[in-house]
């Protein structure tokens, strides 16, 4: 199985000029925890995660009432807290290879590229879904 079969296609992205507030609001609205960061040409420049946001705000959880009145969020661009030049995989990368890359680097997502074009994102959740689907297909031992 390869990453292209498991990935989320056309992932939610954020512009590198966006603020931390925009990132938090987008994550809240879409339910995603990992967002590729792109420049004005749509080129991948980084990844921002809910973990990055929690660390930047020194919060144990991202609960709106804890950050909504924080004026710093409007001044802090995502480029300050995002991961620059993130590890990436291609659509045809084997799932096992992507999982190893994530485990070895202690990361929760990998942007998926087709050449230099972002075409998806694969996360630990995608791998868990695939694993759960695989388990459902297995016969129950007697």
Image (cartoon, helix red, strand yellow):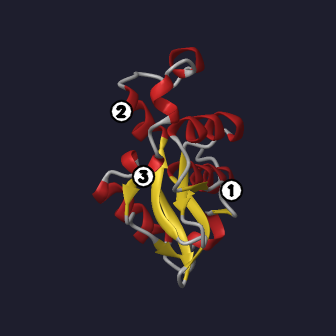
Q: Which of the pair 11/39 is nearer the observer?
A: 39
Q: Counting residues from the N terminus, which is met first, the one under dot 1 or under dot 3?
A: 3
Q: Counting residues from the N terminus, which is met first, the one under dot 1 or under dot 2?
A: 2
Task: State the image coordinates of residue 36 (x, y, percent, origin top left).
Answer: 54, 58
| Element carrying mark 1 | helix
Residue occupied by mark 2: 55
Q: Which of the pair 73/9 is nearer the observer?
A: 73
Side of 78 where 117 appears, left or right? right
Q: Residue at x 62, y 72 (%)?
A: 4
| Element carrying mark 3 | helix
Q: Which of the pair 135/41 is nearer the observer?
A: 41
Residue occupied by mark 3: 79
Label annotation for residue 82: none
Marks 1, 2: nearer the viewer = 2
Q: Are marks 1 and 2 in contact (CB under 8 Å)?
A: no
Give the residue at the far bottom of this rendering.
115
């Amino acid at each position: 199985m390869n990453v292209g079969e498991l990935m989320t296609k056309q992932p939610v992205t954020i512009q590198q000029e966006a603020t931390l507030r925009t990132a938090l609001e987008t994550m809240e609205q879409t339910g995603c925890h990992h967002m590729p960061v792109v420049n004005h040409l749509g080129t991948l420049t980084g990844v921002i995660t809910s973990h990055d946001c929690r660390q930047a705000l020194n919060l144990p959880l991202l609960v709106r009432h804890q950050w909504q009145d924080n004026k710093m969020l409007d001044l802090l661009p995502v480029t300050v807290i995002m991961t620059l030049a993130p590890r990436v995989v291609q659509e045809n990368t084997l799932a096992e290879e992507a999982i190893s890359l994530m485990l070895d680097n202690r990361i929760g997502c990998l942007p998926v590229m087709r050449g230099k074009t972002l075409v998806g994102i694969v996360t630990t959740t995608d791998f868990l879904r695939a694993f759960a689907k695989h388990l459902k297909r297995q016969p129950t031992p007697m």
